[in-house]
Amino acid sequence: MGPILKRIGIGIALATLLMVVIGFLLPATYTVTRAVTINATSERIHTFVGDLEQWEDWTPWVKAEFDRLDQEYQKERGRTNDRIASLMTSGASDKEIEAAKAAGEDLSKTHQDKVDAWFSRNTTRDQIGVFEGAGYASEGLYRSQLDCIMFTKGLKPFCAACDRGIREIVERYGE
């Protein structure tokens, strides 16, 4: 049994040494670049994006309407969460607690159905642009399409930017 363990130990040591050597041969840094071709003159582009007064043109969707829909849901969701917490801390029966949790899930599903219907009616649903609202923030963060699996719940595709980024990484490391 001793010679077998010795061989295993030597094999592990050689594999570790090989990984260290390969690690030293890899570059310390790498650069990832992306480019987009826009069919317009640089003057036209700079005029458009350099004027913050044109902000509404940058994000061509009815954001205020969506925010109102979402804020109404968030208020109701807060009341539902408070009710669940109250039941859990007041010694309510498991049946009551589970019923309140199920009602919360139903509320979420109903809201998501409303959001999906709202997005499907929006004329910018398939456009690529600058849409304000991302990362659980209504303002200050942006996404490239109206909806994406990274923005709202449900089974839906990634937006064009996410899809392209994922494909690039898979192609790079899948070779």
Image (cartoon, grey):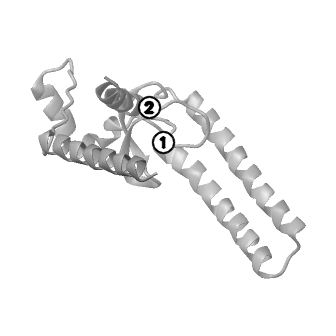
Answer left or right for 94 relative to 109. Answer: right
Q: Nearer the viewer, residue 104 or 126?
A: 104
- Looking at the image, can residue 92 be seen? yes
Contact (Cβ within 8 Å) of mark 1 with mark 2: yes
Q: Position of residue 5 (x, y in %)?
A: 40, 51
- Label 2 crowd bin: few (<14), some (14–19), many (20+), radius 10 Å: many
Name which quarter of the figure residue 98 lies in.
bottom right
Q: Nearer the viewer, residue 62 or 90?
A: 90
Answer left or right for 18 relative to 142. Answer: left
Q: Residue furthest left?
A: 43
Image vertical order of residue 93 relative to residue 118, above or below? below
Q: Position of residue 91 (x, y in %)?
A: 83, 80
Q: Residue at x 68, y 39 (%)?
A: 113
The residue type indicated by label 1 comes to: Met
On residue 159, which mark appears?
A: 2
Image vertical order of residue 93 relative to residue 170, above or below? below
Answer left or right for 152 relative to 53. Answer: right
Label 1 to label 2: alpha-carbon separation: 8 Å
Q: Nearer the viewer, residue 144 or 11?
A: 11
Q: Residue at x 65, y 43 (%)?
A: 112
Mark positioned earlier in the residue sequence (1 or 2)? 1
Q: Residue at x 35, y 26 (%)?
A: 174
Disc 1 element: loop
The residue type indicated by label 2 comes to: Cys
- Looking at the image, can residue 27 be seen? no
Q: Residue furthest bottom?
A: 90
Q: Quadrant of the C terminus?
A: top left
Q: Which residue is mark 1?
A: 150
Q: Position of residue 119 (x, y in %)?
A: 56, 33
